Image (spheres, grey):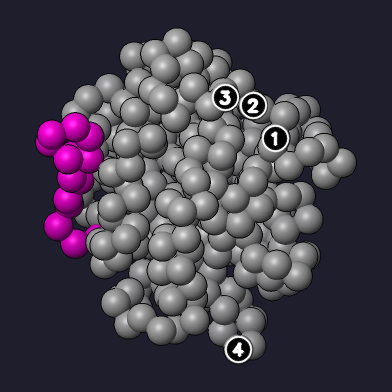
Amino acid sequence: MTDLRNPVSQLTLKIRTDDTSSSPLVSEFDPMDSALENSDPASATQTSRYFEDSGFVVLPDLLSESELIPVSDEIDVYLSGGSKKAPADAIIYEPGSCPPRIRNIFHIHRFSAVCAKLAHHPKIISVVRQILGSPLRLYSSGLFAKPAEVGTQVPLHQDMAYWPFEPFQLLSCWIALDDSTVENGCVRFLPESHKLGLLHHVPSGIPGNSLGIDDKRVTGLNEHAVEVRRGSCVLHHCLTAHRSEANRAARPRRGLIFVYMSPRVRLTDPSKIKGTPDFPVVDGDNG
């Protein structure tokens, strides 16, 4: 099990970019292979070590098309306004979009049975458990829709700047519901930035992502634009700095996120949690 007790962090300001728009759509960070789908212990250990070193890891083609279709269809129902299950305060719209286009739907596992089921998927849980331990708990979930041509940027930030938990032993599993490329606003990471601790953030003025990093320690760090195919997953540490550009393409870049917690994580400020805190166990017979 990876030890995440050491604080990790993210960087911003003048960062060096490394776009992969001319590379195959798999991502240069591809340490895993099909052995992941078979829960190969050696492969799981390799994934854990890469995550610990870099602050994120790509799991290419983790989910099959047959596994994705019901999830993708469910998301499209929400995006088209065909479902009224999502409470109004869980939805963020793209600023200035006309007609209004959904930017984010937060805590989607609470009202979508399809998404809640995916959060328990054995292929995901087996890898996350290797990193965080067991019993594994689900903190939150969210859709980042990044609609075609109007999807706005997400500022460089660390997730932990938003979350009232200690110790910093949480990770996000970002699932690509569409091919994610530089053109349509793929996620960009600063490798090893999680090792810096929690960085200084300031208001960003961007709805749905209200904080951005303002810390000189990110100056000069390499940034990697991670392009992945539909069905691939990217795990990143709660202190790994990341961002995304606007979607300039004629196709969306939908990403579904689940946030998992180690058994050691405790809530430090209940006032920052909407509603009654509920962090269900999602692994094994307990899930």
* Disc 3 from disc 4: Cα separation: 42 Å
* Disc 1 from disc 4: Cα separation: 34 Å
> In front: mark 3 or mark 1?
3
- Residue drawn at point x = 63 percent, y = 69 percent: 147
The image shows residue 286, relative to residue 147, as above or below, that is above
Are the residues flagged by discs 1 and 4 in contact, CB closer than 8 Å? no
Instruction: Name the disc covering residue 30, or none.
Output: 2
* Disc 3 from disc 1: Cα separation: 13 Å
- Residue drawn at point x = 70 percent, y = 55 percent: 185
In primary-sequence order, the first of circles 3 and 4 is 3
Instruction: Name the disc covering residue 99, or none.
Output: 4
- Disc 2 secondary structure class: loop
* Disc 2 from disc 1: Cα separation: 6 Å
Q: Quadrant of the N terminus?
A: top left
Residue bearing mark 1? 27
Nearest the viewer among 203 and 240 is 240
Q: Position of residue 85 (x, y in %)?
A: 29, 77
> In front: mark 4 or mark 2?
2
Residue type of the residue flagged with mark 4: Pro
Residue type of the residue flagged with mark 2: Asp
In primary-sequence order, the first of circles 1 and 4 is 1
Q: Residues within 10 Å of mark 2 (few under 14, many from 20)?
A: few
- Disc 1 secondary structure class: loop
Residue bearing mark 3? 33
* Disc 3 from disc 2: Cα separation: 8 Å
How many circles with numbers are drawn on the protein? Answer: 4
Q: Position of residue 115 (x, y in %)?
A: 34, 58
**Magenta span:** 274-287
In primary-sequence order, the first of circles 4 and 2 is 2
Residue type of the residue flagged with mark 3: Asp
Q: Quadrant of residue 110?
A: bottom left
- Residue drawn at point x = 50 percent, y = 38 percent: 62
